[in-house]
Image (tube, grey):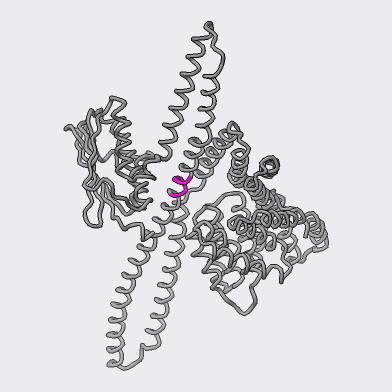
Amino acid sequence: MNSDTLLHYTQYLKIISGSDKNASFTSDISLANYYSKRSNYDSALQITLKGSKEAKDYPVYYRYFRYLNSVILLKKNNHKDALTGFFNTLRLAETAKDTAGHIRSLNGIGWTYLEMSQPREALDWLHKALKVTGDKNFDNLHSIIYLNMAPCYGMLGNMDSVIHCVSQARTIAEKNGDLLTLANALALGTNICVYQGDMNKALQLIRQALDIRKVLNDPFYIVSDMAAMADIYSNMHLPEKGIAVANEAIIIARKNNLESKLPFIYMALAANYRVAGDYKNLAAITQQSLELRDSLFQKTKAKELAEMQARYEAEKQLASIKLLQQENELKDIRNRDAMYVAAAIFMLLIGGGTFFYSYSRTIEKRKRAEERALMERRRLHAIIETQEEERRRISAELHDGIGPVLSAVKLNMSQLAYQPEDAQKYRTAMQLIDESYKELRTISHQMMPTVLIGNGLMAAIDELASVFNSSGALKVSTGADDPTRRYDSSLEVNLYRIIQEMMNNIVKYAKATEAQIQLLHERNELSIMIEDNGEGFDKKQLERSRGNGWNNVLSRLSVIGGTIEIDTQPSRKGTVIFITAPIKSQSKI
């Protein structure tokens, strides 16, 4: 139903509902959906909050208002509060044995993790949603779950699962006449066609999806489809069309406060500028994209969200313990008048049961702690991988895009007719071009050293040392027992970033003149020693530090399962840093 038509019927229902609470609540839910579709999220939230208060004595409507409130928060890119709401509605649905609400809440949690680019966590919750069954057919909800699972598998590179999920969702949507779900399935089918290289089919599907979106009049999805269409045009080498579509999508997104959609549109726009050879606009849009991503990342406090999930699990376990205690108390009452011998036997059994229960709880707590630790490593791994992938892309853009332009400018300058009176200006211009190219190479190298990808960790460390040596401020020597050995790419990148951070700290704070970096490969462990002759420091200050540099080091060590030890004192010269990492740690992520 078109959103304007929805508004008309909603307003009419509100007028005729009178004192009928069911009709009034139904009208409010429809009105909230209307405002949500038009991206008027503040108005939608006011309705859902008001509805939650008024529906306290109507559990079904109360749960749905709370659920809808979380959906709207998610669309506003407020991941933390959205996840809080979904966990709350999950508890309510479980208590009320509301199967549909149970499925919707689990799907909402998975959807939130998907929007946060955490596909593994999202899939865990979405699979839980599919496993919930009841005495009714929930095909309409299952189709939505499949649509959320498809991009998760896409992020993980599992295209067979993507195709399966999209096919399942489309079949259900066509059977039920569900236009919204069908449009989503068509949009995801577009991604499959792009992956398979069939751009004409991809363009056909995204146009069909966009036509349905415009009928439904939902800007949230319209801009997503337009970004996909712009990206397809770049692959078809039709940048003029792609740039026009992307710019139109940006206007719609800003008009409707869809800030979370802008990074995807910027990526599509950048792809078209690259195809068109417009490197000036490519550099500008890349900078805007990075600034926006940093802003959105700061708003998403993933650690708080993970703690929230752990809190939910702990509360669920606590409820189970209370229930077990109540059952034991009931057994005691029923057996109060039993024979002494039977009572003695019963107490022995209870004693054994208590011991077994305590032992089981210890094992369960340990298992939960391990699961939370694994979840945290996966979350950090996903964040760091995303950051490194963005660095690789920007490094390539700078090197392959802007570098040739500077070279071409220098070549053209060298071919200009020589005028003696302009000699100084000519030399200055050529010098500025050379300095710009040198600065470009430095930035590109810092973003992602080519030698690290091509030749491995030790080669990248040698190159890093040469940079410090060429500055004259610090003399760095390196060594390794097996300098040509390659390791897992994620392990190499994380260790390189840690070493880079440690060396930068030596230059900034230690006032050292010499430093050494040594690598030692022992069985299944890689050890790194970094030593300098600078001023020592109080390690407690570092442990209390809230700086991004030290926190990034700890995050990367957590991902690779590594450790760090620092031998230093304020009263003595020299500091030694020991870093160890298991070589096979990546297989656990």
Determine the residue positioned at 50% across, 37% down.
Answer: 400
* Left or right of 425, for residue 265: right
Q: Tell me the chief SS of the magenta region.
A: helix
Image quadrant containing the C terminus: bottom left
Q: 17 left or right of 375?
A: right
Residue 160: where, in percent of width, then height? 54, 65
Nearest the eye: 184 or 418? 418
Q: In which quarter of the image is residue 443?
A: top left
In depth, the one of 24 and 514 nearer the eye is: 514
Figure label count: 0
Is 98 rendered above or below residue 498?
Answer: below
Q: Position of residue 312 (x, y in %)?
A: 46, 62
Residue 17 visible here: yes
- Residue sitting farthest toward the top: 421
For image coordinates 32% across by 45% down, the residue present is 457
Task: Give the residues drawn in magenta, as a range.
Answer: 385-389
The image quadrant where one finds the N terminus is bottom right
Q: In this view, does 538 lie to the left or right of 403?
A: left
Q: Identify which residue, 572 or 461, lies in the foreground.
A: 461
Residue 222 percent across, percent down from the top left: 69, 51
Residue nearer the viewer, 283 or 100: 283
Residue 524, placed above or below residue 394 = below
Vertical relation: 467 (above or below) 455: above
Residue at 28 percent across and 33 percent down: it is 506
- Residue 41, visible in the rendered structure: no
